[in-house]
Amino acid sequence: MIRYDKRSQPCLPGFEQFFGVPLDEENRWIKLSEIIPWDEFADAYYQNMSSGMGRPAKDARLVIGAVIIKHKLCLSDEETIEQIRENPYLQYFVGLPSFQTEPPFAPSLFVDIRRRMGDQVFDQFNQAIVNKLENRKTKGSDNADPPESPVCRKDSEPANEQPCTDEAHCGKLIVDATVAEQAIRFPTDLGLLDEARQISEELIDVLYPLSGLQKKPRTYRRKARKAFLALAKQRKASINKRRRAIRQQLQYLNRNLGHIDMLLDLVPDESTALTFHQRRQYWIIQHVYRQQEEMYRTRSQRCDHRIVSISQPHVRPIIRGKAGKTVEFGAKISVSLTAERLAHVDHLSWESFHEGHDLPSQVEAYKDRHGYYPEVVIADTLYGSRANRRYLADRGIRFAGKSLGRPKKETIDNRHLLRAEARRRRAEYRERIPIEGKFGQGKNGYRLNYIRARTKATSEAWIRSVFLVMNLLVLAGTFFAPVKTALSYSYSVVKDRFLSINRLVWAYASPGIGFWQSATNLKVASF
């Protein structure tokens, strides 16, 4: 049952004072809470819930705000609740009327929250952020802005951005793909078989007392474990030794699966003999055995829908070919980035796919969000197929990439034109840097490369929550001036200090000039 009151946040002086000290109105959480469209978020969160049936749900702002806090600070579920319970600013951010020492809800509720937040809910969240930015552009200042008129961020719009003259085409669309890696153990064929064998032995231990047999089937678990450790402890085993160890584990697992089938036939009620979790494990280890047996028999290193984690069978190996990491284990996502630096997850799949085929759907999604097509699409050469170029040309969209076919021969007449075209193409290709930086921000700052959810639905919600937090930071940077810290330097200051250090190094390297004499003559500022 929905329980949400569309009321404004109580005024800050009315919030209960913490240890007699009033809350700071310039706090980052208070500023962020003022610009988030909570009502639109609540409508999207409650769209699949009944308004009159069921147990009353937690307030939408409370649960959505807790998700934002969790991924903004990279906390666990339990630590997020503790931080909210101890911090008055976080309690104000999630919409509590006053400070309280009781936890707002149990940490286990985060699992249900992530399951409830599907891709449609996050799409509506991002659309509300887009509408907030569009209203600020058109009206100049939003009516829902804080009383203190915020200073617009200087770098919120690119310096070379020109106003759109064509109503049907406006803005730039940058597209790329990456992999959000799951927090799983690095898989090996021998390790998967050993884990599957141990699960099969546990299932035999559960079914044997219910079968009525006088003698328990033999599993040879000690010999199997000893054979596994004999190879696992070797620093670098040969191919023949690995194949021999895999064959042994396959034989042990095959014997155990036969015992499980026999015991299930003897159990009076097969439906209640195993729990849902145990039946799921039994189904997974059967698939693991079939895949590993096929790869062993055919001497192959791949198979379709390969399982690399028994606890998370939806995870697939994604061949990326990156430096230092050729294979990544997780969900592959196609992301589009606008000129306002808002990132949208357009396609998320656990199977490997060709991201170039997502370009038409990403362009159409851009039109649905903004009401017009982009002027130019910026992507790498993987997206520059003939079908994609034909699709963009039919809609009057320019593809910022190298033209297909043989390059034109440079002559005296067209030399300046070709070189100008090459400079423009290089400049546009460098504009892909923001989306690579967005991936780095998500992976290094918000652990997009370490997804700790276990199920498929909760992992997808985890990934989309990270992009939601990054979009909210873009929204905050647009409404409020950036806070100057000790590490924020202007470009001119950094350039002057770099040149000073450079002159110092050259003076030290030049003959006849001592290092300390040069250091005293140059005024080098310390960072």
Image (tube, helix red, strand yellow):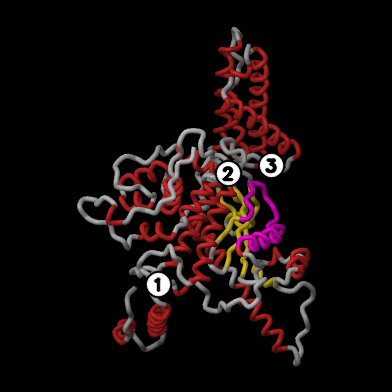
Mark 3 vs mark 1: which is more N-terminal? 1
Residue drawn at point x = 33 percent, y = 85 percent: 522
Q: Residue at x 41, y 86 (%)?
A: 510
Is residue 344 rendered magenta in the image? no
Residue 84 spot, x, y in % from top left:
35, 47
Label of residue 151 in the image? 1
Residue bearing the label numbered 3: 305
Instruction: Give percent across and percent down for residue 454.
Output: 53, 40
**Labels 3 and 2: the sequence-earlier one:** 2
Is 123 in front, or is 73?
Answer: 123
Magenta run includes residue 363:
yes
Residue 252 sits above or below residue 105 on the image: above
Dot in front, 3 or 1: 1
Magenta segment main secondary structure? helix
Judge depth for marks 3 and 2 and give the one in front. 3
Image depth: mark 2 or mark 1 in front: 1
- Measure how far apart labels 3 and 2 are at the Cα level: 28 Å
- Which residue is the site of mark 2? 236
Most foreground residue, 226 or 131: 131
| Towards the viewer: 174 or 385 | 174
Task: Determine whether the residue tagged by mark 2 lies in a helix, strand or loop.
Answer: loop
Seen at 56% across and 77% down, the residue is 161
User: What type is the residue that disc 3 sits on?
Assistant: His
**SS under mark 1:** loop
Mark 2 residue type: Lys
Mark 3 and mark 1: span between their CA atoms? 52 Å
Q: Which residue lies furthest to the left in this view?
A: 20
Q: What residue range appears in magenta?
A: 346-369
